[in-house]
Image (tube, helix red, strand yellow):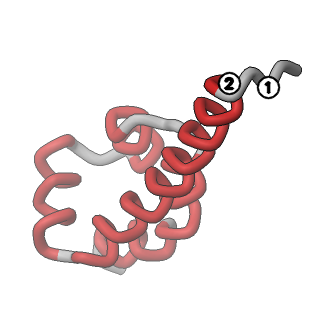
Amino acid sequence: MAKWDLIAEQLPIITKMAREGNTETEIIEYLKISRNTFYKYKKQHPELQEALNEGYRTSLEKVEAALYKAALGYSY
């Protein structure tokens, strides 16, 4: 099985890791690939970039919602 096939199977986990705030460096370490390979795959396989974007977008939405609440005076 090719290296990309193994990574493609991990796309849901990559999305989850991005959603949880993991950096690309942490994702690269989890995948046990080089940074150059990761960036090559991001260019060659748009589904990898989309998995990352989806996760980061969800994470960013949560941060924005929390900041909005804080700006309105909401306290925990």
The picture places residue 11, in percent across and down from the top left corner, at 47, 69
Image side of residue 68 versus residue 3, left or right = right
User: Helix or strand or loop: what does disc 1 sit on?
Assistant: loop
Q: Residues within 10 Å of mark 1 (few under 14, many from 20)?
A: few
Q: Are marks 2 and 1 in contact (CB under 8 Å)?
A: yes
Looking at the image, residue 32 lies above or below residue 11: above
Q: Amino acid at mark 1?
A: Tyr
Residue at the spot 68% in from the left edge and 24% down from the top edge:
70
Residue at the spot 39% in from the left edge and 67% down from the top edge:
7
Which of the two residues, 19 or 76, is positioned nearer the viewer here?
Answer: 76
Q: Quadrant of the C terminus?
A: top right
Tell me how far mark 2 sits from mark 1, CA to CA. Answer: 5 Å
Q: Residues within 10 Å of mark 2 (few under 14, many from 20)?
A: few
Q: Amino acid at mark 2?
A: Ala
The picture places residue 27, in percent across and down from the top left corner, at 42, 43
- Check the image and name the residue furthest to the right: 76
The picture places residue 32, in percent across and down from the top left corner, at 37, 44
Which of the two residues, 15 or 28, is positioned nearer the viewer here?
Answer: 15
Q: Quadrant of the N terminus?
A: bottom left
User: Helix or strand or loop: what does disc 2 sit on?
Assistant: helix
- Check the image and name the residue furthest to the front: 72
Looking at the image, residue 43 lies above or below residue 74: below
Image side of residue 50 versus residue 61, left or right = left
Q: Which residue is mark 2?
A: 70
Which of the two residues, 19 or 38, is positioned nearer the viewer here?
Answer: 19
Q: Which residue is mark 1?
A: 74
Q: How many marks?
A: 2
Residue at the spot 32% in from the left edge and 77% down from the top edge:
47
| Residue 6, label in figure | none
Quadrant of the image occupied by residue 74: top right
